[in-house]
Amino acid sequence: MEGIRMKCNFHNGIGVDANGRSGGLALQRKEKVALQVISYSKNHIDAEAIDQQGSKWRLTGFYGEPNTNQHDSSWSLLRRLGSGNQGAWVCMGDFNEILWLTEKEGGRLKSDKQMKDFREALDDAGLCDLGFTGSRFTWKRRRNKQTLIKKRLDRATANSDWCNLFPDFKVTHLISSRSDHCPLLLDTEGNMIRNKFRGRRRRNKFEVMWLKEMEAQQIIEDVWSCASWDLKKKMNGVANRLKKWSDLKFHNLRDKVDKLTNELEMLRSNGDKDEELMKEEHLCVEIDDLLQKEESFWMQRAKINWLHAGGKHKLSPRPSISAQKDEFHQRSGG
């Protein structure tokens, strides 16, 4: 968790350990976010947030018991959290249950009573489902060669006060190449700030992600081997050659990630055949590789010490890095 906190530039938070491979909760915040934890357990973290306009609202991260025999305890907790609540409240997470039959595909037919119990618990807590954009399901697992099960286990819910406070909210099911769950993105401002930083002119700078590329090392060695060039000329030559190479290799890195992610989403929505699952695994590897490069890009702009990551490399020279923390905050949604 500490590694994730550093990568995302979070300054404070609370974490609840997982039980084996199940559960585990964490609530992290950035420096400018006012957040106070009210209560927590192995199944929830409840906090009060204060936005920049001074409005107060509750944020609860929720984890429902994975065993259906223990769902009653999850719904009792949800009701306790909602009892006597006054003000805006959003509760989101992995509830480990579906509301309707349309939220499941494959496997045995879901018990009507189990879904009804979940719906009644949300009603009693004063919460309603916020809907979503993106993939129809948030979890999938192949039980055997013949059975692929998909469910919408993860969701965001809120009361009417919260919806009135943030009328432009948007919930998106993101795609993960490493988990069988889709991450949820709750954007309180919708699309209002999406294009704020587009069109900026980029300055030349050394990128940490180049350290993992053998081509970058070859470019540096080629330029540095020019005996007739002085130090200044070699430095300029390395910078120009690396920029041209990087523009070709990493042009629109985010667009490439989005394109592959869309392909992955289509496969997960429609693909059940073995060859499609093999293609899905291949896409996950490609996306992971691009995300690692993008992570290095934004870590650098967050002023995280890249020398630690590159200390084992012998690339030389290494020009100084000018981080752009504001860009990182915008890119990561902070």
Image: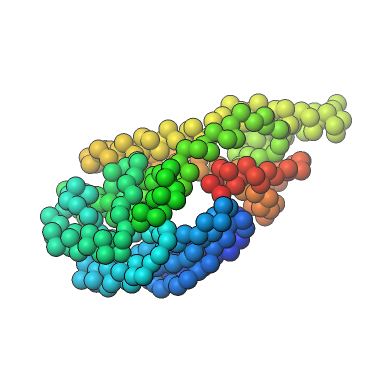
Give the image location of residue 193, x and y in percent.
Answer: 53, 38
Give the image location of residue 82, x and y in percent.
Answer: 34, 67
Lateral position of residue 14 relative to residue 240, left or right: left
Residue 211 in sight in this render: no
Give the image location of residue 333, x and y in percent.
Answer: 53, 46
Residue at the spot 36% in from the left edge and 54% down from the top edge: 160
Q: Nearer the viewer, residue 53 or 310?
A: 53
Residue at the spot 54% in from the left edge and 33% down from the top edge: 195
Above/below status of 9 relative to 203: below
Give the image location of residue 187, x and y in percent.
Answer: 46, 46
Lateral position of residue 214 relative to residue 80, left or right: right
Lateral position of residue 46 relative to residue 69, left or right: right
Above/below status of 329 relative to 226: below
Residue at the spot 28% in from the left edge and 47% down from the top edge: 137
Residue at the spot 22% in from the left edge and 62% down from the top edge: 120
Above/below status of 229 relative to 68: above
| Total count of labels | 0
Q: Where is residue 208, by image quadrant?
A: top right
